[in-house]
Image: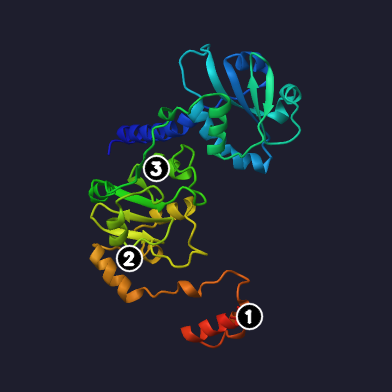
Amino acid sequence: MNTTLLFLLQFLLILVQSSNTDSINDHLIELKDSSIQETLEKADFSFIYFYSDNCQYCHKFNPTFENLSVLYNNLTNDDNEHKRFQVLKVDARRNPRLRELFKINSFPTLKLLQYETKEIFTYEYGRDLNTLMEYFRQNVHVEPNNANYKSKVSVFQNSTISDFIKNNKNDRLIVFTMSYISDWEDYNYPVHFYQQLASSNKDVEFAICDMELSTDVTDIIADYEISNYPSMIYFDKKGRFKLFHTNSQNHIVNDVLNLSHIEQFINNINNDDITGKWFTSTQELHEYNQQHLDYEGHKFQKIGFNQRQSNNNNNDKLSEEQEYELLLQDLEL
């Protein structure tokens, strides 16, 4: 390939990747000692996040704040345009005037300023995204602008997921989850790791099936024997598929699906030793599970539960009846 053409393609790839990252950063507004009035006078209300770089609780809140910034800070070509509401952040240790003005003694601290009256309200409720959005709705009467973010993740709640599965133009990954599950509460917002992964990966199409909201997906659940959430299925362009924790019975261990799991699954998708075998049909999956899948869900125990039984019988293989009798004895039934 021509060297100049190769360089141009590499440059365009870097440009596209950086634009995905910058789209979030463009919404972040930093308030500083040197620009207090000119920044605050641009909005009727300002929600201000005071943070410190070495604060672990701030690091935990940062993704939520970035989501708020994208949803409420609308990009405009007019720097002087007056707004109803804006979301700001302050590095409090580097801006002592602001720290003194808002009486900041700990991090993170969240304040709401009404510019006209100069009233300052300390936010003391939950720091999750939904609670914050409801607070803005009730106290500032503003709604998030969901158009600020163009998601690369398809979200399915009905049988249209079948069309996504059958489309073999690209490799596809579907996560089956529920919005109350740890790590998946904010899956539809821009800073969630799954959204970020979808934006940076051009070779795979990403989707989510929210089982809490889904209707008319029973055929999919039955066909692929999905009984555990969160879990995922990877489909390649040949029509084959691989599964991750879809029928896991050990909910104590396998109820977590995070960025590391997904990246490892994608990066090793053609390594059967790591990600398991490919299936070419749901019938093949059914036959395989009938031969290899034994129910063992009743044997998994949390640490500390019923340990007397386990510790005293490490060398003996108990039948299900014997285990049941021991359990009744432990419960004094």
The span from disc 2 to disc 1 (Cα, nearest Å) is 38 Å
* Image-quadrant location for residue 280: bottom left
Taking the view exactly as shown, the residue that stands out farthest to the bottom is 316
Inspect this view and state whether residue 207 appears. yes
Q: Amino acid at mark 2?
A: Lys
> Which one is in front, 241 or 22?
241
| Residue to which mark 1 is pinned | 308
The answer to whether residue 219 is above or below residue 36 is below
Q: Check whether the beta carbons of the residues at disc 3 and disc 1 lie within 8 A of each other.
A: no
Inspect this view and state whether residue 318 appears. no
* Image-quadrant location for residue 107: top right
Q: Secondary structure at mark 3?
A: helix
Q: Could you tell me which quadrant the C terminus lies in?
A: bottom right
Chain-order first, disc 2 or disc 3: 3
- Residue 219: x and y, percent? 27, 57
Label 2 Cα neighbours within 10 Å, binned few <14 / some 14-19 / many ≥20 = some
- Residue 100: x and y, percent? 76, 24
Q: Is residue 126 left or right of residue 202?
A: right
Q: Amino acid at mark 1?
A: Arg
Which numbered disc covers residue 198?
3
Residue found at x 52% / y 13%: 79
- Residue 259: x and y, percent? 48, 50
Chain-order first, disc 3 or disc 1: 3
| Residue to which mark 2 is pinned | 277
Q: Amino acid at mark 3?
A: Ala
The answer to whether residue 31 is above or below residue 160 is above
The span from disc 3 to disc 1 (Cα, nearest Å) is 47 Å
Chain-order first, disc 2 or disc 1: 2
